[in-house]
Image (cartoon, rainbow, N blue to C red):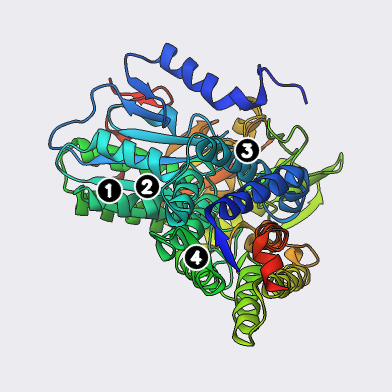
């Protein structure tokens, strides 16, 4: 019930695939309340990440995550670049030197990443941002692990909480980012950042549940 | 989508190659990462001025690099903030030993990326100050929004601070001056049509044949209200009234009036706007003592305009009049 370097790398690849598959969708969500570039930007960044991690293995999971973060910081632009970049950089710092991660390691890394995003973007729960997906995901993951759930089960509960959080952004009035300029007009739209964050959390549940990590947990 | 481009993915790169070919006497274009830098940078003993933002607003910012204005500009993808590695490279390229000022428009992405860049530059020993420009009165400024957007006052701040830096004023002085320009400048824009981001391939928003968006942002962000088109006399009143009331600008004030095209509106219409603005301000006892009219902070091919007022005093006027030699603004040389 551990996440190997290969599985962490597969998670990053799965996220890149999900972003590519949903590039148009994310951009449409952004066009409604932002500036119509979230899918384009995230896809450019994650394609650059794939090129980078295909070029050669990193020494450990922490280094892999830091490489992803630095690549996103220098290729995405917008608010997504520093926010997703910080998420991966802080996860990488938390996982520094680790060849594989336990469920607790994974939860600690994700929590560190989400705290980094909060410090950088200063958004709180309910501001209609990626935080609305990520904080419930971390909370559910920790709660499940605390109750003794296996990693696969915990990741599934984390993904479910993330999806609920994402959908809960629909009625919200945005208070951060470009969408906040719309005031009430930002309501009744799902937040694009919350949506890409759900793809990230869902990719973890799918990747790790479909691997040894998930089976061991059953 | 009809545009004079080869490939949507190459728009920024090929435009920068054009800038490099056209203006090699005044600027150098660095690649990987993309930075437009003054040909003679770094200027020893002078505060370096760095700005940047998404592309699609030309001539801002790359067209304002040169003597008397910016030392470097960081162009992002179209309507997308540049990245910290660009800003760090720009900061190091223009550091002449007197520190570097980052002039940042208030957009979440620009602010976050410039903050990361300032952290990186500081850790490499470069003294950096940042001033965030937020002059757009269309946006409610409150704890519950990202705050007012940075628009037309950015152009004026870059010109005025550039002149002050040429006089070898200190980083603290130039930063204070930048905050003063921001504090005395207010703007509001409107759109007649949308624009199309090359990578998106379709208009950012839809406006009916006779609709206008009052309070538009420079990326096509919606503004205060969508309404039927009206004579320009009324449109100018809708833009200028909230500007004048916000600061406020009072009878007896002297102002710089900046009438800007969003990219697709021709100069003939800008002069009609200017004429109405002049009458509007005269009626309130406000005197236009300097003006700037033309496409300087654009939104691709969007039709529409923005109005920026800057309350002037003798010092700001003298700095505005000082020589400038950039591809986008040039006088006194």
> Circle 1 is placed at which residue position?
B121
Q: Which tag, 3 or 2, sits closer to the chain's start?
A: 2
- Chain holding disc 1: B
Horizontal and vertical percent position of residue B172: 20, 54
> Circle 4 is placed at which residue position?
A113
Q: Quadrant of the N terminus of chain B?
A: top right
Image position of B2 with respect to B33: above or below: above
**Between B1 and B256, the one nearer to me in the picture:** B1
Horizontal and vertical percent position of residue B289: 40, 41
Image position of B45 with respect to A104: above or below: above
Image position of B51 with respect to B176: above or below: above
| Camera-nearest label, 3 or 2 | 2
Q: Which element type, helix, strand or loop, lies under badge 1?
A: helix
Q: Which tag, 2 or 1, sits closer to the chain's start?
A: 2
> Circle 3 is placed at which residue position?
B273
CA separation in Å, label 2 and label 4: 29 Å
Mark 3 on the same chain as mark 2: yes
**Between B331 and A203, the one nearer to me in the picture:** A203
> Circle 2 is placed at which residue position?
B103
């Amino acid at each position: 019930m551990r996440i190997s370097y290969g599985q962490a790398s597969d998670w990053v690849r799965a996220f890149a695939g999900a972003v590519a598959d949903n590039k148009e969708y994310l951009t449409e969500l952004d066009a409604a309340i932002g500036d119509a570039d979230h899918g384009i930007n995230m896809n450019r960044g994650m394609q650059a990440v794939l090129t980078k991690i295909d070029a050669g293995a990193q020494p450990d999971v922490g280094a892999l995550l830091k490489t992803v973060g630095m690549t996103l910081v220098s290729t995405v632009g917008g608010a997504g670049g520093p926010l997703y970049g910080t998420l991966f950089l802080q996860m990488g710092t938390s996982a520094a030197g680790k060849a594989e991660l336990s469920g607790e390691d994974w939860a600690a890394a994700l929590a560190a990443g989400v705290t980094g995003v909060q410090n950088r973007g200063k958004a709180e729960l309910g501001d209609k941002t990626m935080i609305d997906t990520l904080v419930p995901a971390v909370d559910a993951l920790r709660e499940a692990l605390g109750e003794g759930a296996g990693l696969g089960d915990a990741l599934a509960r984390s993904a479910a909480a993330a999806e609920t959080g994402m959908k809960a952004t629909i009625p919200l009035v945005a208070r951060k980012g470009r969408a906040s300029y719309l005031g009430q007009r930002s309501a009744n739209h799902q937040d694009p950042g919350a949506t890409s964050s759900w793809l990230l959390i869902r990719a973890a549940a799918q990747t790790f549940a479909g691997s040894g990590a998930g089976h061991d947990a059953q | 989508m009809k545009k004079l481009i080869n490939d949507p993915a190459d728009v920024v790169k090929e435009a920068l190659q054009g800038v490099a070919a056209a203006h090699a006497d005044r600027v150098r274009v660095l690649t990987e990462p993309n930075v437009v830098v003054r040909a003679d940078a770094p200027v020893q003993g002078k505060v370096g001025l760095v700005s940047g933002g998404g592309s699609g607003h030309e001539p801002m910012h790359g067209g304002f690099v040169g003597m008397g204005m910016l030392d470097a500009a960081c162009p992002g993808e179209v309507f997308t903030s540049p990245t910290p590695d660009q800003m760090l490279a720009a900061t190091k390229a223009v550091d002449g030993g007197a520190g570097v000022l980052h002039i940042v428009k208030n957009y979440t992405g620009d602010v976050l990326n410039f903050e990361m860049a300032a952290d990186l530059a500081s850790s490499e020993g470069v003294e950096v100050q940042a001033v965030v420009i937020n002059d757009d009165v269309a946006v409610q400024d409150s704890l519950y929004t990202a705050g007012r957007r940075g628009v037309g006052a950015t152009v004026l701040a870059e010109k005025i601070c550039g002149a002050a830096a040429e006089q070898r004023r200190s980083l603290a002085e130039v930063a204070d001056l930048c905050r003063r320009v921001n504090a005395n400048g207010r703007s509001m824009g409107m759109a007649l049509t949308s624009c199309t981001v090359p990578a998106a391939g379709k208009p950012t928003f839809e406006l009916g044949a006779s609709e206008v968006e009052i309070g538009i942002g420079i990326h096509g962000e919606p503004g205060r209200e969508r309404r039927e088109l009206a004579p320009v006399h009324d449109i100018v009143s809708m833009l200028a009234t909230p500007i004048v009331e916000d600061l406020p600008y009072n009878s007896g004030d002297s102002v710089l009036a900046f009438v800007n095209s969003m990219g697709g509106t021709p100069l003939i219409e800008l002069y009609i706007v200017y004429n109405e603005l002049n009458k509007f301000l005269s009626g309130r006892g406000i005197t236009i003592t300097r003006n700037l009219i033309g496409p300087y902070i654009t939104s691709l091919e969007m039709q529409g305009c923005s109005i920026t007022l800057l309350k002037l005093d003798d010092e700001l006027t003298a700095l505005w009049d000082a020589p400038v030699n950039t591809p986008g603004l040039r006088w006194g040389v």
